[in-house]
DNA sequence: GCCAACGTTGGC
DNA sequence: GCCAACGTTGGC
């Protein structure tokens, strides 16, 4: 079982939205490195849900991968901002996963806390200028987060 | 609102 | 294939 971190701006999609929806397709990722991580995700993997572009940015809960290797439906929707004219259903360019709500932390772990707990090498999300929206989390890092 | 970081685009 | 220009992300 692997651990991941997935970022979202809460004004776009928040942990509260996921709690309400119970599960969602993690669509809209249009960065190849992030997509490659999405492709690697397996059913039952755990994702830390991170709120970006808010005060304070923080890990706010947990989600579990319940389906993997899904074609992101927004790539085929001409009305979506994520539409990709060069992608076809036969050879989809953007894959993602479906995640299910697990838990909303009673106390989010803020970015400033994360910076005191981990080095940028241990956990790239604390690295200045980091923009990657999907990244793996080392098991030891995950355990330290979960035991908090 | 500013701006550093960095991915993408497109001319050559 | 290089790289300057440009656009986006996201912390502050």
Image: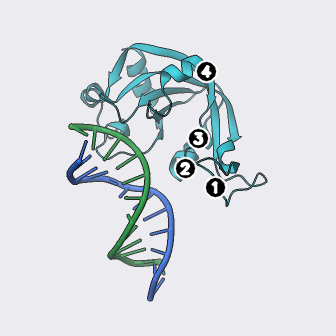
Chain colours: A cyan, B blue, C green
User: Which residue is at a point 57% across and 19% down the rendered structure image?
Assistant: A101
User: Marks 1/4: CA distance?
Assistant: 26 Å
Q: Secondary structure at mark 3?
A: helix
| Residue labelled with disc 4 | A21
Q: Chain of mark 3?
A: A
User: Marks 1/2: CA distance?
Assistant: 9 Å
Q: Earlier in the sequence, mark 3 or mark 4?
A: 4
User: Marks 3/1: CA distance?
Assistant: 18 Å
Same-chain status of marks 3 and 1? yes
Q: Is residue A72 visible?
A: no
Q: Secondary structure at mark 4?
A: helix
Question: Comparing marks 3 and 4, which lies closer to the viewer?
Answer: 4
Q: Is residue A129 visible?
A: yes
Expressed as whole percent of the image width and height from the top left, the position of residue A79 reads 64, 48
Expressed as whole percent of the image width and height from the top left, the position of residue A67 reads 69, 30
| Residue labelled with disc 2 | A30
How would you rate the neighbour count of disc 2 (Cα within 10 Å): few for under 14, some for 14-19, many for 20 or more? some
How would you rate the neighbour count of disc 4 (Cα within 10 Å): few for under 14, some for 14-19, many for 20 or more? few
User: Which residue is at a point 43% across and 29% down the rendered structure image?
Assistant: A50
Q: Secondary structure at mark 2?
A: loop
Same-chain status of marks 2 and 3? yes
Q: Earlier in the sequence, mark 3 or mark 1?
A: 3
Front-lying residue, A139 or A99? A99
| Residue labelled with disc 3 | A38
| Residue labelled with disc 1 | A84
Same-chain status of marks 4 and 2? yes
Front-lying residue, A109 or A121? A109
A65 horizontally vs A113: left or right: right
Front-lying residue, A126 or A18? A18
Expressed as whole percent of the image width and height from the top left, the position of residue A112 reads 25, 28
How would you rate the neighbour count of disc 3 (Cα within 10 Å): few for under 14, some for 14-19, many for 20 or more? many
């Amino acid at each position: 079982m692997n651990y991941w971190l997935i970022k979202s701006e809460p004004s776009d999609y928040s942990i509260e939205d996921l709690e309400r929806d119970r599960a969602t397709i993690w669509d809209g990722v249009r960065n190849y490195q992030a997509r490659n991580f999405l492709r690697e995700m397996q059913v039952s993997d755990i994702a830390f849900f991170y709120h970006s572009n808010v005060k304070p940015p923080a890990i706010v809960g947990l989600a579990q991968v319940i389906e993997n290797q899904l074609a992101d439906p927004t790539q085929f929707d001409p009305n979506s901002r994520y539409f990709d004219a060069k992608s076809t259903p036969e050879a989809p360019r953007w894959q993602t996963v479906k995640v299910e709500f697990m838990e909303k932390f009673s106390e989010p772990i803020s970015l400033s806390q994360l910076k005191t707990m981990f080095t940028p090498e241990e956990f790239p999300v604390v690295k200045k200028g980091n923009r990657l929206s999907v990244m793996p989390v080392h098991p030891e890092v995950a355990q330290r987060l979960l035991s908090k």
